[in-house]
Amino acid sequence: MRKEEALRGIPQISRIVEKFRGRFSEELVKAVAREVAERFRREIKEGKRETAEGIYEEVERKLLERSRTSLRRVINATGVVINTNLGRAPLSEEVARFILEIATGYSNLEFELSRGERGSRNVHVEGYLKELTGAESALVVNNNAGAVFLVLNTLAKGKEVVVSRGELVEIGGSFRIPDIMRASGANLVEVGTTNRTRISDYEGAVNENTALLMKVHRSNFYMKGFVESVSLEDLVDLGRRKGIPVYYDAGSGLITDLHRIGLKAEEHSFGESIRKGVDLVSGSGDKLLGGPQAGIIIGKKDLIDRMRKNPLMRVLRVDKMTLAGLEMTLRVYLEGRFEDIPVIRMITEREEVLRRKARRLRRRLKGVKGLEVKILREISKPGGGSLPELDLPTYCVSLKHRSMSAEKLATRLREGDPPVIVRISKEAVLLDMRTVGEDEIKPLSQAILKALV
Ligand SMILES: *Cc1c(COP(=O)(O)O)cnc(C)c1O
């Protein structure tokens, strides 16, 4: 008897459709309503559910879930500025607006307006890169892995490339220098040991089959203690003496010198490497450069011209949206507005700004029952794939709940809307203000309140 009454409480599909009219498509509501009603009916029959109460809420939850895109904006409260899993460099609105302008219409992507002829898509950024780095020539491909591959394949296929054992790195799982080397057709010649490599090691490995001397930035780790590696200058000097080009995979694609923006880290900018005489340098567009995903190669014109002719250029070519994002990003650098590059701004953010954000967030969480909210002076590791040795003082909001573990709260935040990614330390959830924008404080506080109910 009670069951029948409960079954009668399940509304008709048309009533559910009526309730959500205008908010979701009728087709979607119908499908979801049927599915939920069916499940409620079964559960009532099996005695797993007492009444049909909450059916509208359940339909709404499913509708929201189904109408979400797969790719979603998240709040990064980890303090890791360049996080490959979270999409690396966020772009400024200025850059995004230019991408929108180019993406939503036709453009002169490969068309020379002055002559009315077919042109090259590379010209849109080459000039900027030359001016910003002092290099003779520049080329852009899909990402830095592609850049490394193109350099090795063009200049060293079937020949030897000398690399220090201390630099045979793996970057983010699928990119390993020895593997990419093999795939490109170049033969790796390892020299030195894990912790020490001297110029005499390179010199001993050079023969008539040597095509390149390569140096790789360690990017995601650093070594301390009994270590020795060869400087770019010494490698350039050896390359000159032997008539072999020197290639530096700089990894992060730094455009400005770090000390100019007040950072002490061992990271050569593109320009520095070129000034030291390196023949070719490559780096990513979306690490410290702070632009869209891209691989940038700069250096000697004759070497880069050989790469332009490689059929792989077509395989690795960049899209108009990438070029638009890169052009506008490089323009911002050319105008010296470093602080308008979100990545640079976050890495150099002043402590008082970080503390102010932490205070704003704490104020919004005042009086929540069972929640202990503290502001902690902590250390951010802004790198995650670059600047491995850099520790920056930061401010975090620490959350501890009386009846919810830090792991549970972190999971609920991650599964919320918008999802929030945090770190956990000493059984507290830490929200690092370095990577949280001013305009994200309010949605962040709302997400926390939702996660706690
Ligand atoms: C990140 C990195 C790469 C790979 O660059 P992507 O742009 O991610 O393809 C290659 N080499 C080094 C040294 C790196 O740091």
Image (cartoon, rainbow, N blue to C red):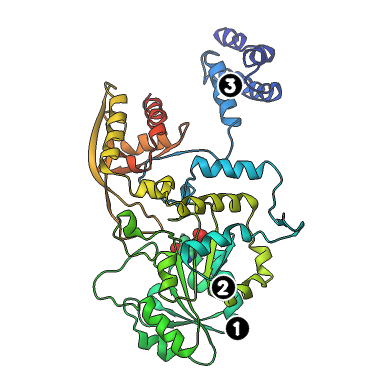
Mark drawn on residue 61: none
Q: Amino acid at mark 2?
A: Val
Q: Position of residue 74 (x, y in %)?
A: 47, 38
136, 208: nearer the viewer: 136
Q: Dot 3 lies on which element?
A: helix
Q: Is residue 232 visible?
A: yes
Identity of the residue drawn at 36% across and 64% down: 267
Report crowding for label 3: few under 14, some 14 to 19, many 20 or more residues within 10 A (C-alpha): many
Q: Dot 1 lies on which element?
A: loop
Q: Dot 2 lies on which element?
A: helix
Q: Which residue is mark 2?
A: 151
Q: Which residue is mark 3?
A: 59
Q: Residue furthest right?
A: 116
Q: Is residue 183 visible?
A: no
71 relative position to 438: left or right: right
> Would you place residue 9 above or below residue 179 in this image?
above
Callouts 3 and 1 close, C-beta under 8 Å: no
Marks 2 and 3: which is nearer the front? 2
Q: Amino acid at mark 3?
A: Val
Q: Earlier in the sequence, mark 2 or mark 3?
A: 3
Q: Position of residue 303 (x, y in %)?
A: 58, 76
Marks 1 and 2: which is nearer the front? 2
Mark drawn on residue 158: 1
